[in-house]
Amino acid sequence: MPASIREEEWFRQRDVLARFGELALKSDDLDEILHEACHLVGQALGTDIAKVMELQPDGTTLLIKAGVGWPSGIVGNVTVQANQTSSEGHALRTGTAVISEDIETEDRFEYAAFIRDAGIRALVNVIIIGAKDQPSYGILQVDSCKPRRFTEDDTKFLRSYANLIAAAVSRLRKIAEMREGEARLRVSEERYRALVTATSNVVYRMNPDWTEMQQLDGRGFLSDTAKPSKAWMLGYIHPDDQAQVMTSIQEAVWAKGIFALEHRVCRADGTVGWTHSRAVPLFDQQGEITEWFGAASDITELKRVEGALIEGEGRLRTLMEGIPLLVWRSGNEGKWTWASPQWLDYTGQRQEESRDWGWLQAVHPDDHEMARQAWHEAGKDGLLDVEFRVRRAADGTWRWHQTRSVPVRAVPGPGHPKGRILEWLGTTTDIEDLKHLQGQQGVLLAELQHRTRNLLAVVRNVARRSIDPSPGRNQYDARLAAMGRVQGFLARSSAWSVPLQELVNAELLAAGDGTSDRVIIDGPSVNLPGDGVQPMALALHELATNAVKYGAIAQPSGHLSVTWRLEGLGSTAQLVLEWRESGVAIPNGLPARQGYGTELITRALPYQLKAKTHLEFTLDGVRCTIALPAGTFRNEDGRT
Amino acid sequence: MTDSSLASLQDRRVLVAEDEYMIAEEIVEALVDAGAVVLGPVSTVGEALDLLVAENEIHGALLDVNLVGRTIWPVVDVLLARGVPMVLATGYEASAIPPVYIHLPRCEKPVGIRDLTRAIARQIAKLK
């Protein structure tokens, strides 16, 4: 070959190397690079046929990845096996350029059908090496339709060329790996964001010393910061909390630790809210902070509720410390946990002295047993109500106090239908004055009753001296006597009421016969309160007087039964009293008696006591029924 | 016997509230004798209030201050609002009467029925 031609070829090859090298560096598109590689190499060697075969992960299959001068359907589809018998396999194994100058005479290798079909006679294989420690990328193959010699220069050129391809492939593979990594990172970051979003409202990034906010995604809670901003402190943080936020930041930056703080913020809608903000530092390889990644949740509502709770507790405490009662808290069995300042002031005890059973030291020694017993019972009854004497520090006197408490219970649950007792909240009240007043009241009441009975006695005396003896005067005297008895009963009663049984007995006895075996008195234990007892007593007096004078008691054949019973319940309850005389012969037929007694029973009782009454003078004797409504009597349980 | 001091009671409708039946009866008798129409008598505050609701035309009232342990003041308030003259019968000292009612004419028990009817007659006459 003449030197001038060789030189021309050399220049052409250098030009191709330069042009391809430029492309291989610039382009990010591997297909473009490989196609151009084939195009240029074909030109450079004057064959116009070339291809790049990519070694597949199995290590033996070569896919025709790019090519020029081939019929359609070959590139991207056809594969060749790099085995012992193929020139491609040989090239891969040896790493050297494998040249077949004429495949017709070649006896080393076998050739794929498509090569023969394309009329290929000569070819050269050059390996495209892989990156460091990586398998080869594949083979660059330049083909010729004529038998051809490939010079040493050709193979040198091809090896340089193949190395350029290798460099480009390696570069692009790295880019692809990086992109893949980025994509994976993006997915993982999106997942992380989703997690943060699920648990927080706001995500933000800060520069290493927090002087600049890189970005903040406010999610409606705070307004967004899209571009880095140095004014974030003024924009987001409540003025009163800025100093505290700064301090926390400085501590976190100094410690390279986590920033965490609850503080007030200016919300997106302009109102003030509360946030719980946390940020973690991200480090570079030297361990320096590169940025801070933070999340902030909206705790405004939580804070509001918390505030209301604190306020409520504060109000309760103010109340407990403000009321003029000695307030305390206790565990079971009277083990105090807290005493109000009032208790401490009153008894002179210190807070710690009152704890547990310490408060008992302020209680009169004679009352200790009672107090302990009351606490023991309280556990069963769920109520503490006891009176004992407490020493007043101011003057050293023992003063009676009433102590009351009910337990504070947990929400009812299995095994605790009423709820487990959490603690006892109680008051101890000075009732010394009340006790004195009650005593005075008792004295006053006794005095009043004494005077009333004296007055009645005087009235009886005045009547006897003013009126000449007559049946009328006797009746008047007897009625005043009945009223006097009522006052006597009430004076003796502590409950301001009189047992019906005693009232009936007393009136029969006063009339002249209460013990006769012809008289039956029977009924349950019932009391009549002070308001109703007088009219009832007067009615019984009239009936008894009549019986003694004309009726069942006056006549030897007569019988009298006075019985009563309780009927109904609650507001419909009534006390029914029946006065029945029998075996009484009425002389001169039935009397048309419309005297004081009759009026009392048929008119006064219904008017004053809302009683239902019935009075009948039968041929057998007097029958009277008096039904008193609920509220005018008390049965044994003390209910009215 | 006609008493000229009771003339103002003629055809007047007078409410009587008194929890002692016998005393109530006596008052009613005296008022009827003087030509008045008696509304009641009633023995409880509740009955008295019911009566005020039912009766539009009331010219005067005789009221026991304490009816079976309850004070008459709710009834008094209604009567004051309606401008009805009244006389209170009471066993209490003046000190036990709330200041707002202290100006009301009252008779202290035990009081003669004649004094009571004259007192209400005077109040009704004043209004005429």
Image: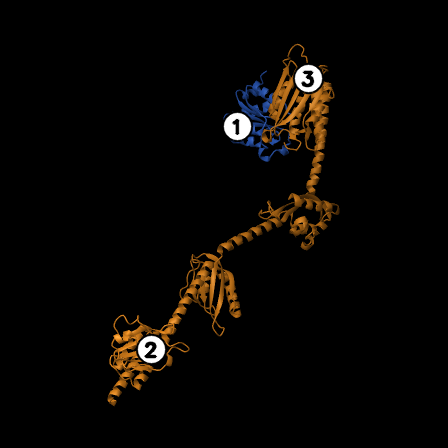
Chain colours: A orange, B blue
Pick whichever, A615 or A566, lies toward us: A566
Same chain for the residues at labels 2 and 3, yes or no?
Answer: yes
| Quadrant containing the N terminus of chain A in the rendered view | bottom left
Kindly check if marks 2 and 1 are in contact, taking CB atoms under 8 A apart as contact. no
Q: How busy is the neighbourhood of tag 2: few (under 14 within 10 Å), some, or many (20 plus)?
A: some
**Of the numbered discs in the image, which one, if any, rests on residue B52?**
1
Q: Amino acid at mark 1?
A: Leu
A436 with respect to A39 (left or right): right
Please indicate whether residue B20 sits to the left or right of residue A450 in the image: left
**Residue A108 location in percent, x, y?**
32, 81
Q: Front-most of A355 and A398? A: A355
Find residue B88 and report its horizontal and vertical position in percent.
Answer: 59, 28
How packed mark 1 is, by other alpha carbons closer than 10 Å (few <14, some 14-19, many 20 or more), is some
* Quarter location, residue A562: top right
Residue extending furthest right?
A366
Q: Position of residue A255 (x, y in %)?
A: 53, 69
Q: Amino acid at mark 2?
A: Ser
* CA distance separating discs 2 and 3: 150 Å
The C terminus of chain A - image quarter: top right
Could you confirm whether marks 2 and 1 are on the same chain?
no
Residue shown at 66% from the left, 44% from the top: A380
In front: mark 3 or mark 1? 3
Residue A546: which disc? 3
Residue B18 higher or lower than A253, as above or below = above
- Asked if one can make out residue A235 in the rendered structure from this viewpoint, the answer is no
Cα separation between marks 2 and 1: 128 Å
Q: Which mark is residue A86?
A: 2
Residue, x 70% and y 40% (percent of image)?
A435
Q: Chain of mark 2?
A: A
